[in-house]
Amino acid sequence: MTRRISLTQYLIEQQRQHGHIPQELRLLIEVVARACKRIAISVNKGALGEVLGTAGSENVQGEVQKKLDIIANEVLIEANEWGGHLAAMASEEMEGIYLVPNRFPQGEYLLMFDPLDGSSNIDVNVSIGTIFSVLKKPEGSVGVSEADFLQPGTAQAAAGYCVYGPQTTLVLTVGDGVVMFTLDREQGSFVLTEDEVKIPEDTKEFAINMSNMRHWDAPMKRYIDECLAGSTGPRGKDFNMRWIASMVADVHRILTRGGVFMYPWDKREPGKAGKLRLMYEANPMAFLVEQAGGAASNARQRIMEMQPSQLHERVAVVLGSKNEVERVTRYHLEAK
Ligand code: AHM
Ligand code: MG
């Protein structure tokens, strides 16, 4: 059975025994977790906290912001800006990077987040979450600029998400496997509930927004057609489909029992990109999935090896059970 230790104890042990995390990174993760607890309180209050509905503004990607998108963004900034562990932050809800104000000490880390992913599920009481990715400021760079953030996913020092569902669960990697912590509301602390998360290599479950099928590439259609053909088709087995429309919740299911999650390239999007954002959605999820023994590709190459060219860059995403991700990638490469 998993030892029921707190997030704090887990991080201190990682720091002492394995040398995985320096003091500043430990502080950073604790602060993010604390912010997630505050966001969980607002999410749980829902209509009673006057936090549902739209805020009457748009973010940089032209999406309507929900009140909770903005609240979660502010909570994360306020919690993180004064601790001395960060140089700057970037968020789905802010066009440019957020520099730590001069009145606070400056640290070495860069924090990126999607403060509240799954916006369309906020008002309907379905699981949503916070996704985060941590990078180190490049050695020798003076000050901080947007260019410092443009590092491939392989450079991540830590990544995770917090899903606000029937339970509030924090899922984390510091590059030493994946661990899950469940929020004990009475104690107010995250408690380790899963210490060796592993994704099975094979699966019979896929997650994709099927209503976009007419906009996909031929290899994507081929993969899904074969799944739908069931036990008498080329795959020789029946598949099941799940789509929550909150990436955090869909990825959480995959980390819990396997499966493959896809948000493919779509003819409606400019260039060869998908809907999801590389830096604060795809990269952190890819890091978690790989650390749990799964794979993550953009249907052609490993997501974590992509060199970002913009903060809000979009990317096609195929992640989860290794053999399925490899199959989807193979279909795309063969069709080239
Ligand atoms: P968001 O960051 O604006 O919430 O958008 C990202 C979300 C993902 O959580 C989810 O996988 C996807 O958008 C759902 O999109 P769709 O509306 O096509 O189901
Ligand atoms: Mg999002």
Image (tube, rainbow, N blue to C red):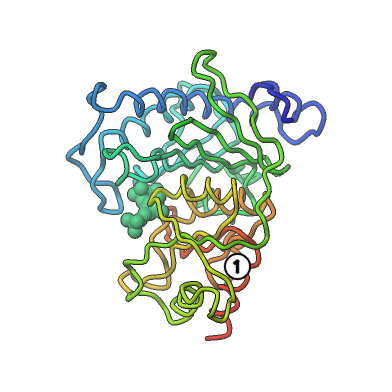
Q: Does the residue labelled 1 lie within 8 Å of ligand 1?
A: no
For the residue carrying disc 1, how many other residues have a C-alpha within 10 Å: few (<14), some (14-19), or many (20+)? Answer: many
Residue at the extreme left of the image, as rendered: 56
Q: In this view, does 14 lie above or below 287?
A: above
Q: Is mark 1 on a helix, strand or loop?
A: helix
Q: Is residue 78 visible?
A: yes
Residue name at image x 66 percent, y 42 percent: 178
Q: Where is residue 243 in the image (x, y as percent from the top left)?
A: 41, 55
Picture quadrant where residue 55 is located: top left
Q: Which residue type does callout 1 highlight? A: Glu
Q: Position of residue 272 (x, y in %)?
A: 42, 72
Residue at the extreme right of the image, as rendered: 17
Q: Where is residue 114 in the image (x, y as percent from the top left)?
A: 42, 43
Residue at the extreme bottom of the image, as rendered: 335
Residue name at image x 40 percent, y 40 percent: 128
Residue matched to label 1: 324
Give 332 or 279, whichever is nearer the viewer.
332
Viewed as shown, does residue 186 lie left or right of 157? left
Q: Position of residue 17 (x, y in %)?
A: 82, 29
Residue name at image x 60 percent, y 73 percent: 327
Q: How many marks?
A: 1
Q: Is residue 143 visible?
A: no
Q: In this view, does 332 lie above or below 50?
A: below
Viewed as shown, does residue 320 lie left or right of 291? left
Give 4 or 29, whichever is nearer the viewer.
4
Quarter of the image with the N terminus in it: top right
Q: In this view, does 91 lie above or below 4?
A: below
Give 201 or 319, whichever is nearer the viewer.
201
